Image (spheres, helix red, strand yellow):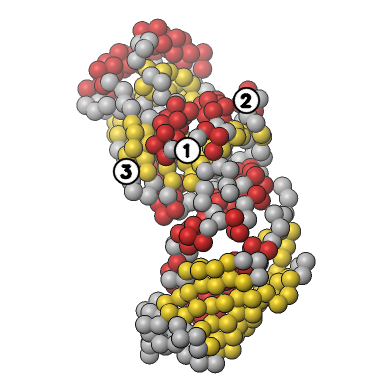
Amino acid sequence: MMKYKLLVLDVDGTLLNSKKQITPRTKTALLKAQQLGMQLVLASGRPTYGVVPVARELEMDRNGGYILSYNGGQIFDARTRELLFEKRIDPHMFALLERQARKRGFPIFTYHQDKIITDSPLNKRIISEAELNGMEIVGVDNFAEAIDFSPCKCMFVGEDAQALDGLRQYLKKHLAGTIDIFPSEDYFLEIVPQFIDKANTLSVLADILKVGMEEIMAIGDGVCDVTMIQMAGFGVAMANAPTSVRRCADYVTGTNDEDGVATLVENRILANIRPAEISLEELNARARHALMGHLGIQYIYASESRVEATMPVDQRTRQPFGILHGGATLALAETVAGLGSMILCLPDEVMVGMQVSGNHVSSAHEGDTVRAVATIIHKGRSSHVWDVNVYTSTDKLISSVRVLNSILKKQGG
């Protein structure tokens, strides 16, 4: 069975390429991993509001998964939208933070729901941060007075890294024991509650889910990802990560512009999982949002030579006059033959459906449940041929379908 249960992904510089996009190859690999039972965790320094669209693109709101945002300040359930954990900064600190920002000439900002609150709304770095997360900028004259809530984190902005480090040293001395402070970019100095980082919050999530660290794979590219990479059972660095980060990892994959995440998932997760090792209950659950789930198809038996599944004749699968639609029947046949070929494929092979042809000899009526039985009649190195018979609940044959699947070697890289 699957060795890793959680796949933890940093977002910027890891999951997203330099254009801030999830490539089609990476998306396909991560959707397959979820269908096979792995849960995704997006671990990001972004606010929760800025990570939700990324999670939605990966269908985590359907498949289940978690957002670990603010560098660990919150844990958010992507499916239920429940906040599972959070830790915030005491707002009384912001008088000192604003005073130091003004004294040293650094813009300051924080996040609140779908807004960025700042004393410098025209700063290019803050504008870029707002655009990245799809947030509105709210400019204020008195920053400390405007913070009438407890933020998850606060940011200073500066183009002089040495001057920012001077502020870091000052605040580290005067606010010791209450906050952690570190540079997240050359131009950002980040303040979070004490003991908040991705690794510590990931351990909280692991306790909630009853998952051991040896069952977690974590991928990142930044200094903020190091503790997470080191703590996970299998820690991975992107090739675009600094040398110090790569040295902490168990494995280095390609860059974020070379589909490094997809390469890792394909070679280290998908290649080691065969459908025959997954229960039918899990396969059915993972397919509930795919076509077979929408048609009500359920696997009921699977082996290397025979696969069976059922499908109801209802408003989803019938023609307007109440009889089973031939197209739904062919979809059912392709579903069972496809699983059969996937079971037969070797770890370095992939199945692609090539041809389906059917003869409809009778009909099934609304209210019935039909059953498809797929039997392999040819198992070659490059192709599989399946005969699929579809029966009514009284075992009357209604369709005979032949399915040809092509077997290809997975592409390396």
| Local secondary structure at mark 2 | loop
Q: Left or right: where does residue 342 sit relative to residue 286?
A: right
In terms of depth relative to the viewer, which is nearer, 154 or 85? 85
Quickly name the residue at label 3. 82
Check if mark 1's residue and mark 3's residue have beta carbons within 8 Å.
no
| Local secondary structure at mark 1 | loop
Quickly name the residue at label 2. 248
Which residue shows up at 41% across the image and 31% down it? 204
Which residue shows up at 51% across the image and 68% down it? 299
The amino acid type, in three-letter code, at marker 3 is Glu
Of callouts 1 and 3, which one flags the residue occurring earlier in the amino acid sequence?
Answer: 3
The amino acid type, in three-letter code, at marker 2 is Cys
Q: Pointer 3: residues within 10 angstroms few (<14), some, or many (20+)? A: few
Question: Which of the 4 quarters of the picture holds residue 144?
Answer: top left
Measured as percent of width and height from the top left, residue 285 is found at 45, 59
The numbered dot on residue 211 is 1
Of callouts 1 and 2, which one flags the residue occurring earlier in the amino acid sequence?
Answer: 1
The amino acid type, in three-letter code, at marker 1 is Val
Compared to residue 4, the image places residue 357 above or below, namely below
